[in-house]
Image (tube, helix red, strand yellow):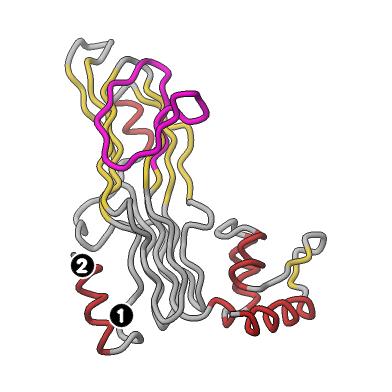
Amino acid sequence: AVDIILKALSKAGVDLVPACSGGDIFSISGLGVHPDTGHMWHEGSNEGVGFGAHAEGDGENSIMHPSEPGCRNNPIEIMEIKAPMMVEFYELRQDSGGSGKNRGGLGAKRGMRYLVESTAFNMAKKTKTKPWGMAGGGDGENGHAIYWPETSKELTIGMNYQKVKAGDRVINFSGGGGGWGNPLLRDPQSVLYDVRNEYISVASAKEDYGVVIDMETMSVDLELTQQHRNAENKTG
């Protein structure tokens, strides 16, 4: 609802409001009987989302949605101490922010392994539509979860409540924010900074921003970048 209200307000001026955020909640949890105590356990965490870019700058990476400002994600160590789950990785989600003169913030991805038979469930809002860009910016990537990744049972889904066995894995992806403004107007050095920090890939730098990066020197090839951007402007 927060994002829809802001989108409506953008009719008064796209400079006044940000692009769409990555969505809401994206919680991943588990419950079952703890093998050490014999008691029921329930543990999980909400994920931050990418915020939409705006006229003054990039969206923030992976912070709590405005609809849940009183929430925060649980530290990995606390989750693993309290519950028979293991966090295999927790990182920013490369290329999830929408392209733009100002880039959308990145979502997060968390890999979970359940160590005992459990019930896994995830709450994910805004999984069917992409977070919209503003003023010519690109859309962000929507969130989802993958159950049993890299197996014959692999399932990509939004909301889910699922029995899992010991060793089963789930990867939770939160959405990225939309971009703001024409991506071809983004400062090439800002694009290079994003590549160096793995916010965006080298492929995205060229395809979405028209910036050609020399991988040997990790610098912007300004001549090829100008040629590529000129060609993109003619075909765009």
| Rendering quarter of residue 56 | bottom left
The image shows residue 6, relative to residue 111, as above or below, that is below
**How many badges with numbers are in the image?**
2
Amino acid at circle 2: Val
Dot 1, how many residues are within 10 Å of its Cα: few (below 14), some (14-19), or many (20+)? many
Q: Position of residue 15 (x, y in %)?
A: 35, 86
- 231 in the magenta segment: no
Q: Position of residue 18 (x, y in %)?
A: 34, 76
Secondary-structure class at tag 1: loop
Question: Extreme front residue here?
Answer: 235
Q: Position of residue 171 (x, y in %)?
A: 42, 36
Q: Quadrant of the N terminus?
A: bottom left
Q: Quadrant of the C terminus?
A: bottom right
Question: Extreme bottom residue here?
Answer: 12
Does residue 143 appear left or right of residue 223 in this picture?
left
Residue that carries the numbered disc 1 in the rendered image: 17
- 154 in the magenta segment: yes
- Tell me where the magenta segment starts and ends, as one range: 147-172
Pick the residue in front: 206 or 107: 206
Q: Position of residue 152 (x, y in %)?
A: 49, 23
Residue that carries the numbered disc 2 in the rendered image: 2
Amino acid at circle 1: Val
Pick the residue in front: 232 or 135: 232
The residue at the point 43 percent across, 57 percent down is: 141
The image shows residue 70, relative to residue 29, as above or below, that is below
The residue at the point 39 percent across, 77 percent down is: 134
Q: Gap between marks 1 and 2, in whole Å?
A: 11 Å
The residue at the point 34 percent across, 15 percent down is: 116
| Rendering quarter of residue 157 | top left
